[in-house]
Image: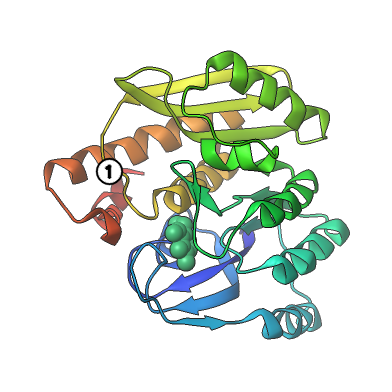
Amino acid sequence: MTKVLTINDISCVGRCSYAVILPILSHFKMEVNLLPTALLSAHTGFKGSKIIDLTSQLEAFYDHFKGLNASYDIILTGYLLNSKQLDFIIDITKKSHSLIIVDPVMADNGKFYSHFDMQYANKMWQLCKQSDIIIPNITELFFLLNRPYNDNYTIEDIQQMIKIVSENGIKKGIITGVSFDFNKFGIVCFEKDTIKIIAKEKIPVNYAGTGDIFASVFVGYYKQTNNFFTACQKAIDWIYLVIKETYLSNNDPRFGVPFEKYLDKI
Ligand code: PXL
C-alpha cells in the first residue's frame, strides 16, 4: 500500500486541504498520515476565520512518527502557516528519500492569500528546489520566481519560467489555472524538456479547494499509472467534470465543489 505523509491544514468549513485530500487519497487506496499545520474554523477566503497555529507542535508530531518507524513513499505538502514551518519542512525534505511533491499554496488571481508575502515566496522557492514535482498555480509560479504577477503572460513567458524551474533541478511540474485565450483554461505540465498544455473550456468561477483537489487526484493517478502526463490528463479530465457540473448548479464558490458525488468516476 502506498503511504503518504500529507502536510496541510484542517479547514473546518470550505472543502479544501484535508477535507478533500483525505477522501481522494483514500479513494486511491493510499494510507494517509497527517502532519497538520493549523486548525481553522474555515479557510481564509471567508472573513473572520479563527486559527489555531500548530507550529510549536510540528516537530514533536514528526519525532513521534519517527519513533513509530513511519516511512513514506510520498510526502505531499500544501498549506503551511509561516516561514518557521517552511524551515522545518525544508529540513525534513532534505533528509528524506520519499517522492517530494510540493503544492506551494500561498496565492491566486495575482494576489497572496492573507499571511503570505514575497519573503515567504522566496522561502517557498527553497522548498520547491528540494522537491521532485511542484504544483503551483500561475500566480504562485510568478511569485516563486520573484516576479510581479502579469495577467498578460504568453506561452513563451511560461516556457521561459519553466526553463528556470528546470535549471534549478526541479524535474517535473504542473502549472494550474493557466489561460492564454479568453475561452480556454487549463494546465501546463513539464517533465524535463517536454512541455504539454492541457486546456478545457473556461468556467468563469473560482471555486475554493480546487488546487488541493487537483493535487491529490494527480498524486493518485500518478501512483496508479506511473506516467506523469497520463496522470495530468486524467486529473484535469476529472476535475473539469466536477467544476463544470458545479457551475451549472450555482453554488457559493467559497464552499468549494461537491466532489463527493464524483468520487466513483475517478
Ligand atoms: O485551498 C487553499 C487553501 C488551503 N488552506 C487554507 C486556505 C486556502 C486558500 O485560501 O485559506 C487555510
Q: Does residue 124 lie above or below 161 as drawn?
A: below
Pinpoint residue 105: horizontal percent, then vertical percent. Answer: 56, 54
Image coordinates of residue 67 in percent, x first then y, are: 80, 83
Instruction: Classify the position of the C terminus by image quarter.
Output: top left
The image quarter in which residue 97 lies: bottom right
Q: Name the residue rendered at 49%, 57% in the picture.
A: 113
Q: Is residue 17 visible?
A: no
* Quadrant of the drawing holding the N terminus: bottom right
Looking at the picture, does residue 161 appear above or below residue 8? above
- On the image, numbered disc 1 is attached to which residue? 242
State the SS at label 1: helix
The front one of 188 and 229 is: 188
Say which of 150 and 204 sits in front: 150
What's the residue at 60%, 36% (across, down)?
148
Residue 260 x %, y % = 28, 57
Relative image position of residue 156 (x, y in whole percent): 60, 14
The kind of residue on which mark 1 rests is: Val
208 sits left or right of 112 in the view: left
Asked if residue 26 lies left or right of residue 238, the reply is right
Query: Which picture quadrant has residue 34?
Result: bottom right
Q: Nearest the camera: 182 or 128?
A: 182
Within 10 angstroms of label 1, few (less than 14), some, or many (20 or more) residues?
many
